[in-house]
Image (cartoon, grey):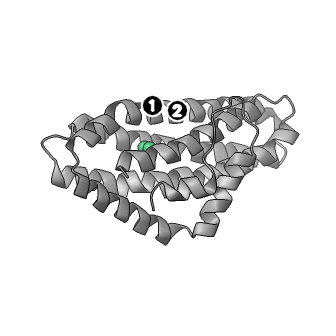
């Protein structure tokens, strides 16, 4: 199992939820859309930021910087960290707008839709960039044993953050959302299997 396989499996889950978010934002009645948007933001806070980005920020990048400083493009690590911070800020701004709408400020609906569309596009661009630039570069420089060490570290970090039951619930949630495309969400067992 390669490090990139683990992260790409998580990307498939995140991309499917972003697709559902885009679909929900297209709804014309904010009252019907707000509960789903809240559930999706809760999912992104936990799955995207805590489970996924923490593997990249706390394990992958420090390892690449320490073990392969000469091969890792400086720009790769900088844009990765910068993008992660920007995505967290977009999430925080979306939460603030959502809470204002939930307390009756219905005129903020257009602003929230625009903010969530930014979040969807920024996240998709980030994931594409990782898969097209960073992962091929990383796959080239990591040995088999380095891959194994990182995958074990991913598992250790994830088990500190989230139980297997909670992880399965997150995947079930992602699968339950309506999507615009037929891009499949991995089953919980498949998603768990990908890094164990
Ligand atoms: Fe990332
Ligand atoms: Fe990623």
Taking depth in this image into account, of 100 and 158 the one nearest to the observer is 158
Ligand 2 falls in quadrant? top left
Side of 84 where 145 appears, left or right: left
Secondary structure, mark 1, is: helix
How far, Cα to Cα, is label 2 from label 1? 6 Å
Residue 11 is situated, as x and y percent measured from the top left of the image, at 51, 42
- The reply to whether callout 2 and callout 1 are in contact (CB within 8 Å) is yes
Of residues 28 and 155, the one drawn nearer to the viewer in this rendering: 155
Residue 194's x, y, as percent? 48, 54
Residue shown at 31% from the left, 35% from the top: 136
The part of the image, by quadrant, that contains residue 164 is: bottom right
Q: Residues within 10 Å of mark 1 (few under 14, many from 20)?
A: few
Between residues 107 and 74, which one lies in front from this camera angle? Answer: 74
Quarter of the image where the C terminus is located: bottom left
Q: In this rendering, is residue 70 above or below 149?
A: above
Q: Is residue 90 in view? A: no
Q: Residue 162 or 87: which is nearer the viewer? A: 162
SS type, badge 2 = helix
Task: Say whether residue 35 is left or right of residue 118.
Answer: right
The furthest residue to the left? 70
For the question of whether residue 83 can be seen, the reply is: yes
Q: Position of residue 32 (x, y in %)?
A: 87, 40
Mark 2 crowdedness (10 Å alpha carbons): few <14, some 14-19, many ≥20: some
Label 1 within 8 A of ligand 2 by Cβ: no
The response on whether ligand 2 sits within 8 Å of label 2 is no
* Residue 94 drawn above or below residue 132: below
Rendered location of residue 15, percent (x, y) = 58, 38
Q: Quadrant of residue 29?
A: top right
**Which residue matches tag 2?**
124
Residue holding disc 1: 128
Q: Is residue 17 left or right of residue 62?
A: right
């Amino acid at each position: 199992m390669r490090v990139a396989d683990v992260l790409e499996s998580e990307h498939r889950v995140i991309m499917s939820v972003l697709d559902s978010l885009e679909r929900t934002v297209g709804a014309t009645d904010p009252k019907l859309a707000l509960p789903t948007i809240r559930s999706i933001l809760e999912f992104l806070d936990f799955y995207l930021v805590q489970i996924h980005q923490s593997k990249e920020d706390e394990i992958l990048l420090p390892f690449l910087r320490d073990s392969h400083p000469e091969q890792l493009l400086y720009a790769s690590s900088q844009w990765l960290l910068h993008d992660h911070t920007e995505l967290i800020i977009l999430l925080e701004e979306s939460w603030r707008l959502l809470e204002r709408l939930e307390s009756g400020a219905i005129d903020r609906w257009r602003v929230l839709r625009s903010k969530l569309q930014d979040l969807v596009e920024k996240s998709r661009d980030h994931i594409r960039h990782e898969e097209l630039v960073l992962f091929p570069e990383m796959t080239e420089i990591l040995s088999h044993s380095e891959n194994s060490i990182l995958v074990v570290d991913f598992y250790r970090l994830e088990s500190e953050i989230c139980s297997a039951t909670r992880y399965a619930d997150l995947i079930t949630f992602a699968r339950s959302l309506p999507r615009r495309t037929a891009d499949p969400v991995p089953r919980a067992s498949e998603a768990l299997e990908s890094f164990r």
